[in-house]
């Protein structure tokens, strides 16, 4: 048995601050047309795809911040993408900054939506692992203020769509094994991940040259250890003076790289992915029901950070009585 | 600041059923001498290092099974290894089958011990993730009866030893991200993992050629995502007609392969490892206290296997009230 899904990566090159939503959406539409011509049923776009990556700036003014957010989806500028999706029968994953009214308050999220082949929004994900910092740190060459501008989500839901069980994550989520596992425990067969990853990481610049390796390693391990396809898609290249990695790739449940982008510009790559290829991993090595040992994992949810005793030695959890 | 630890891999070639404990211990001692000559303070041996990998056979007779187990450690045949460790000032990690008396009953564990440079046992680990099956499955070319012969452990403790915080795991544990995370949450800086991994995996033979890749991928991701050194050491080669992978390697906290064995025989490789190299990862990208989100991870301990609704669709956890 095979359940083929033709998946496109819609990698974006840089988006400058002066680029309008209309211009970006036109680029997304161009890529959707190309993906469709190549037989894709689904295209995955990056995180915060509609604007430049604004968390690199400290912005004091709420109106400035809000200018990067969407109050409705689709809105006037994004509607053409939904219309094209409907016309072509191509679904999409799209990351954007979401302004959501909740109990009379406006909340800001780093969000991704999944839109089906009828242009209907079937899932919404709000980024759980916000990286960076919350306060202005002028010593950095550029800021990474996601912890300032966004409220974190706290759920990794999955959805029955595109003939399988699919889930979403965003950027830094992909470095955390918990992200994949929570979706793996819901039977996920495809995890879509948009990202913006500056090459330069101010707190650990000595590892800047490993950023592509870490990107791929994390997604490969998440794919293999949960028997799922993983599609990671970048907004890449030199944006407002800050260079971000490309390295968009589609990873098979074997952990092998099935396809990858090779530029740091707008680039479409399509791969034919058999969702049934997940089963051999889910039924054998990673048959969770047979092999997982949750009774040994308690610390994963009971502790947030590392616990050490006062003398710097490890602090053990007491044995169960 | 640097805290250098010179770590040796003491990879073993095959051990046949006819090989005596005395013969195997002599090989371990030879490797310890070589490791010492190369400046090592610690040598990591494989899982179940003292005998052939007996879970490949269905054994009905308790005396047959027990013949592969150690009733005491050190015992008469293993004492020379402890004596040599004391004489040379070289600590070691050793995997073996342990027969332990608990409340009047004999229990069988797949165990590893950590022995310090004074030949004192400072830690004991009992394998949590037992792979394979519990019943005789004659359709397999060979059995993998770990679930039959061993009682699982349920703790990943870490220890202050060799100038750092160190932990242990065994074989299949290395494929599970939870293994590294539970130790990561205790500040681990070095995870030692012995393994026996047949090239041929009867339930999924189509992936036999990926076994070295999966071995390395899992340890690289565990190292990077927890900012820890990982040392994986094989019992390799053709044992009683069954071929096992080599691929022993030392992985840095960056996820990079620092050193590896290149044979499937007895082989010693030493690498100088700076335990302080962990800090840059633990303090930045993987600063758990800043970036983990345990409130989103509940499912990891609440569920063992995948949960799907009756119609095959995902079964979501209800939102918290």
Image: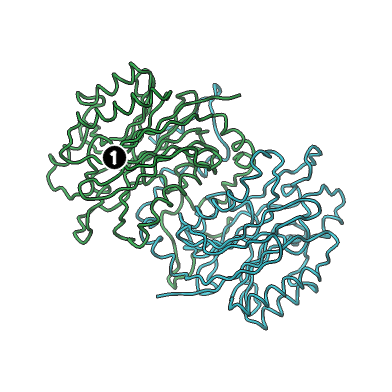
Chain colours: A cyan, B green
Q: Is residue B291 above or below residue A51?
A: above
Q: Residue at label 1? A: B13
Left or right position of B239 against A61? left
The picture quadrant where one finds residue B2 is top right
Q: Chain of mark 1?
A: B
Q: Residue at x 64, y 41 (%)?
A: A207
Left or right position of B43 against B23? right
Q: Residue at x 61, y 71 (%)?
A: A122
Q: Nearer the viewer, residue B316 or A103?
A: B316
Q: Nearer the viewer, residue A154 or A252?
A: A252
Q: Residue furthest bottom?
A: A87
Residue B230 image point, x, y percent: 46, 38
Q: Is residue B75 above or below residue B53?
A: above
Residue B135 image point, x, y percent: 22, 54
Left or right position of A113 against B156? right
Image quadrant where one finds the C terminus of chain A? top left
Image quadrant where one finds the N terminus of chain A? bottom left
The picture quadrant where one finds residue A169 is bottom right
Question: How many numbered discs, if any?
Answer: 1
Residue A19 image point, x, y percent: 83, 64
Q: Secondary structure at mark 1?
A: loop
Q: Residue furthest top?
A: B87
The residue carrying pointer 1 sits among few (fewer than 14), some (14 to 19) or many (20 or more) residues within 10 Å by Cα, namely: many
Q: Residue at x 74, y 52 (%)?
A: A243
Residue A282 image point, x, y percent: 40, 61
């Amino acid at each position: 048995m095979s359940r083929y899904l033709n998946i496109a990566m819609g990698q974006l090159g840089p988006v400058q601050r002066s680029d309008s939503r209309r211009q970006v959406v036109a680029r997304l539409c161009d890529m959707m047309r190309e993906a469709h011509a190549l037989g894709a049923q689904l295209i995955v776009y990056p995180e915060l795809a509609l604007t430049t990556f604004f968390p690199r700036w400290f912005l004091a003014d709420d109106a400035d911040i809000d200018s990067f957010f969407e109050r409705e989806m689709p809105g006037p500028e994004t509607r053409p993408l939904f219309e094209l999706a409907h016309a072509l029968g191509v679904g999409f994953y799209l990351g954007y900054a979401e302004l959501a009214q909740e109990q009379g308050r406006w909340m800001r999220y780093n969000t991704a939506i999944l839109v089906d082949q009828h242009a209907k929004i079937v899932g919404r994900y709000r980024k759980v692992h916000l990286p960076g910092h919350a306060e202005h740190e002028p010593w950095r060459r550029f800021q990474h203020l996601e912890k300032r501008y966004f409220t974190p989500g706290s759920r990794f839901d999955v959805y029955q769509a595109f003939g399988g069980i699919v889930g979403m994550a965003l950027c830094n989520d992909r470095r955390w094994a918990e992200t994949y596992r929570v979706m793996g425990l819901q039977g996920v067969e495809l995890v879509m991940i948009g990202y913006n990853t500056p090459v330069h990481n101010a707190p650990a610049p000595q590892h800047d040259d490993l950023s592509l390796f870490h990107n791929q390693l994390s997604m490969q391990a998440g794919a293999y250890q949960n028997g799922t396809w993983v599609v990671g898609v970048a907004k890449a290249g030199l944006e407002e003076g800050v260079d971000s990695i490309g390295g968009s790739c589609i990873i098979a449940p074997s952990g092998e790289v099935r396809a990858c982008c090779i530029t740091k510009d707008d680039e479409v790559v399509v791969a034919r992915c058999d969702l049934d290829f997940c089963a051999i991993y889910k039924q054998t090595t990673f048959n969770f029901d047979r092999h997982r040992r949750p009774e040994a994992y308690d610390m994963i949810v009971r502790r947030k950070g590392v616990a050490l005793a006062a003398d710097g030695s490890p602090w053990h959890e007491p044995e169960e009585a």
